Structure formats: structure tokens, C-alpha cells
Image: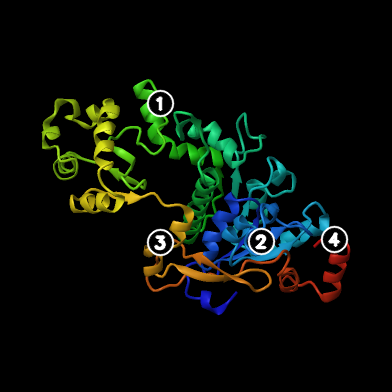
Amino acid sequence: MPEHTADLPLSGITVVSVEQAVAAPFATRQLADLGARVVKVERPGDGDFARRYDTTVHGESSYFVWLNRSKESLTLDLKSDRGRAVLERLLGGADVFVQNLAPGAAVRLGLGAQALGERFPSLIPCAVTGYGSSGPWADRKAYDLLVQCQTGLVSLTGNEHGPARAGVSVADIAGGMYAYSGILTALFTRATTGVARAVEVSLFEALAEWMGQPAYYTRHGGTQPPRLGTQHATIAPYGTYTAADGKEVLFSIQNEREWAALCERFLERPDLVDDPRFATGSDRVARRDELNAIVAERFARSAAGEVTKILDEAGIANAGVNDVQDFLAHPVLGARDRWRDVPLPGGVRVPALLPPVDLAGTEPRMDAVPAVGEHTDRILAELGYGTADIEALRADRVV
């Protein structure tokens, strides 16, 4: 492990991950950022299939570059006895084992939580599943958009013309973040009690937690929140409006003080403050169309720059509607020095954002994205395999 990781919180922790796609790699990359050694076990040859999702980042997949910096790549055929024997040696010195294999595959390979606990009592196993390891859907495959559909999220996104998927892999990200926090909790528990507890996270239940507010609204209100594009389903006014120069500005009213400021200082309609049609937040939602017409008329009289200036002076939160290019050039990221260059296979360096959590006195690990099997020989040597042994494993396509 590079020397610069020695002062990071997870320095000395070894994570072995049989991972692919997004959720598990997202969890383990957070651990690597904090200094853990993450050994990523990949299929010999092509490796993690996420390497081939696209080729937009100098020939590498945008997903893979995002999720796999600072890891070591070991290729291993886990269907072979010799491949599993290598993994056993590796797990003998590991602290955490993460896997998001197909339903039932981990148990068949002897990598289920119970079997691992018997062989490696201090190892923390973490399983990232689709719908849980038990229950009626335990054997079903689950990908991000399938889970978005099953939790009802897709029915909430979009507009009056139809539903839409969220623009990023929210089910995978949710599952990965809960796996990450679960692993940290298990490491703390082991450090304080000596007990290594298994962690399991399902994508469905991770995203189900994020569906809490619309679930309560629907159960107790009788109908689910409507699809309203950028408008907020339960707060008004809250959404995007088009200014006189054609640019869109989003703003939000969160309380009665802000409502009064909007009426008096932006809408130039102080009479609306006490208008019974808009007296409460619920009234404003119920009369959203009337209110939107008033707001839209005012927006049509000013350019976006003037709109944001007045809203800022009134203390009302607002923002222009950026595209991804705008986001990449955002002044906050530049002024706060949030970009670091990360090497790709072949040596090309690309900008990557620092992790969002700043830990005082430390700099996150931002090392290279590995090539397939880049660290295989070194890891095997660490495990006691000689040069002839490694050549034989490679000749038989075990690694």
C-alpha cells in the first residue's frame, strides 16, 4: 500500500471484494478513499463487466473510472478449485469481504456469511443483494432501473406526459452507501467488542428507505404525490420558471416569511400575503395553477440575472438550471479545490472529484484506476506463490 495512506482512518484494513457493476464497487471505493487496501477480484480476461459499459474516458468506461480508483485488481477463476484456494488464502488475512454475486452464487461457492464466519471468525462479510437473501424474491436478479420501478420511484419522476427513470443509478448508489456505512459500523463493533458481524444490504430495501416520504404521503393521504417535472409535489411555489431571456430559474418558498418576501419584493404584490387563496402552504399547493400563472407573469418581465438578483436580496433560495457541462465548470468546485487528477491504465490522468466528506488533517486517497489483473502477480507472491506456481496458474487460466 502506498506510504501516503498510512495516516488515513482505514489504513491497515484489507478488503477483498468479488464485485461487479455499481453498488458493491461504490461501497468499496469509499473504503479505499479512506485508506483501506481493496483487492478487487475479477474474472480472468475481461474482468468486471462494467469495464465495457462504455469507452468514453480515453477508452475506459465512465462507470468503471468513477467506481474503481485506488483498488488492486486480481484476476481469479472462482469456479475452479485452485482459484477458490487462492481466495481462501487471501481471505485469511482480510478484514472485510464484499460480494454482489448473482442470487445464490455466494452460498454455492462457500462464500455465504455463515460459512465464512465458521472459517474466518474475525472476517466481516458484506452481501449486496437485489431483494435480500431470503423471502420470495431472493432468487430474482435486480438491476438499478428494475429496483427504481419496483419501489415506485419511476412513478414519481417525470411529468404529466409520463414517468422517467432517475438520471443516475440511485438504487445502486443507495445500496452502496448503506453497505459502506454498514461495514464501518461492523468494523467499529469488532474493534469495541471483538465480534465480527455480517452485513447485508439489498438494493430494494435501500431505495425503499429513500421512498419514505412519498410512502407516508400515499398511505395516509389516499393518493400518491403527482408527477410535476421540476415542480415540488407538496410545496408551492417551488420549481423552475422561464425568465424573459428564455433561461430557467428554480426557486423555493419554505415558510411564511419567505412567502411574504416573495410577494412584496419580487412579485410586487403585497396584497397576496394575506390573500385567503394562498394563506397556508397547503392552500398554495391546492391552487398551484393560479399561483404559477402569477409567478410566470412576473418572470416574463425580467431576465434571469435580474430575477436571481432580486430573489437573492429577498433571501429566497434560487438557482439556475445547469447542464452537466455547467456543473463541471461550477465555481464552487474550482474555488474549493475539489478536483484531483487520477491515473488510468496506460498513464493518462483524468480529473476526479474528492469524496464529499472532509476529515480534518487528512487528504483522501486518490490513486490509479487498475487495469484488469494488474496486481495479480504481486498479490499471489504476497500469498506465498512462487514464480513457477504463478506461471502454472496463468497457463491454466486460473488467474
Q: Are marks 4 and 1 in contact (CB under 8 Å)?
A: no
Q: Quadrant of the N terminus?
A: bottom right
Contact? badges 1 and 2 (CB < 8 Å): no
Horizontally, residue 274 falls left or right of residue 61, namely left
Q: Is residue 32 left or right of residue 259?
A: right
Label 3 to label 2: alpha-carbon separation: 25 Å
Q: Which mark is first along the chain, 2 or 4?
A: 2
Question: Tag 1: Cα neighbours inside 10 Å, few (<14), some, or many (≥20)?
Answer: some
> Compared with residue 372, is residue 79 higher up or lower down, i.e. above or below?
above
Which residue in the structure is indicated by mark 3? 330
Mark 4 vs 1, N-terminal side: 1
Kindly indicate the quadrant of the structure image that contains residue 330.
Answer: bottom left
Q: Which residue is mark 2?
A: 60
311 vs 93: above or below = above
Comparing labels 4 and 1, the label whose residue is closer to the camera:
1
Query: Of circles 4 and 2, which is in front?
Result: 2
| Mark 4 / mark 3, whichever is N-terminal | 3
- Helix, strand or loop under label 1: loop
Kind of residue at badge 4: Arg
Q: Residue at x 18, y 50 (%)?
A: 314
What percent of the width, then of the height, locates residue 26? Answer: 56, 55
Amino acid of disc 2: Glu
The amino acid sitting under disc 1 is Gln
Choose mark 1 or mark 2, whichever is in front. Answer: 2
Q: Which residue is mark 4?
A: 397
